[in-house]
Amino acid sequence: MSWYPLVLPSQAGRRYLVTGANAGIGFFTSARLAGAGAHVVLSGRSPERLEAATSAIRGMVPAASVESIVIDQSSLDSVRVGADRLIGGPPLDGVVANAGLVHAPRQRLESVDGNELVLATNVLGNFALLSQLLPHLAPGARIVGLGSLASMLSTFRMNDLHLTLGYDFWRAYAQSKIAGQVFAFELDRRLRAAGASVSSLVAHPGYSISGRTPRVPGVNEPTTGTRFADSLQAAWAQGKHRGAEVVLHAMTSPVANGGQFWGPRYLTKGPPALHTPTRTSTDAEIGAQFWSFAEQATDSVFAVGG
């Protein structure tokens, strides 16, 4: 494991937003960016958990420049209010669209806006947020969407994204992760077509689990049982602190470019490597269909200019 941690380029003077940053991949991504000198805005839906995360980062990086903002990704009103606050600050050099539900509910639920809850949280919230933040991104900014191995393990029902025809928690999660990748790659196509300097790419953290992750009070506190169970998967699993390195590479490496799909070298674990996304994720026709669907579901127009 000599590759860990990656040596990051200095991020001094740069400003990032990491959504869902109070735990997991989002937390460790935020901590590492702050450690490299960036100013990091952590977003999440719980003020208490955000406070625990920012305090933990300051404990790890005494000179860390961090702040937090409450955004509930499942609520379009919360997203709009959060976006307005962010636009009131300096431009962003990057957005890590990490927020989402990992453990989907056993029964189909809807967001306050009437969208299927997992899709609303994992994808539509990011779509609405980025539609407002795009003009506020600095030249050359990167948007990194969080992909998943689940995108390789499920079909994609473009005609039933709200899962009204049939719901199970696995499909809800997997289909949302496919949709997130579809959105990220379609966004990059539109940015390229518009001649924009902003780029969009996808990073997946492999099989990164809590029990293989260092304990951080208030952020990652797995039980002894979880530690033991997860240690049995050590041959093919890694901690979330290592999974975050793929995201950091996608955001900061000079060799990472828009439209790419990065993941661990050994698929479930290891240093960053360039991967090939599923054909569904990169299909331009599916991308255009999803874009129209998302605009309707979020009652927004996502204009990509030059």
Image (cartoon, rainbow, N blue to C red):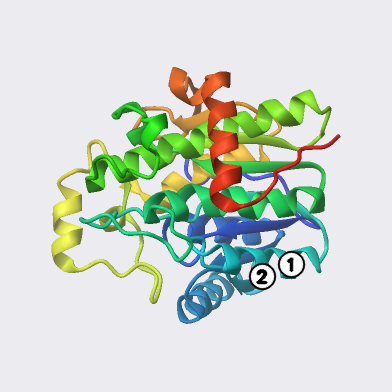
Q: Position of residue 225 (x, y in %)?
A: 13, 63
* Amino acid of disc 1: Asp
Q: How many marks?
A: 2
Q: Name the mark on residue 219.
A: none
Residue under label 2: 81
Q: Which image quadrant is residue 162 in?
A: top left
Q: Is residue 248 visible?
A: no
- Left or right: 18 with respect to 37? left
Q: Name the mark on residue 84.
A: 1
Q: Position of residue 107 (x, y in %)?
A: 22, 56
Front-most of residues 228 and 178: 178
Q: Quick check: marks 2 and 1 in contact, CB under 8 Å?
A: yes
- Left or right: 125 with respect to 218? right
Q: Is residue 177 above or below residue 114?
A: above
Q: Position of residue 141 (x, y in %)?
A: 76, 43
Helix, strand or loop at mark 1: helix
Front-most of residues 225 and 79: 79
Front-most of residues 72 and 244: 72
Q: Is residue 30 visible?
A: yes
Q: Quadrant of the C terminus?
A: top right
Q: Position of residue 281 (x, y in %)?
A: 48, 26
Q: Is residue 114 above or below residue 194?
A: below
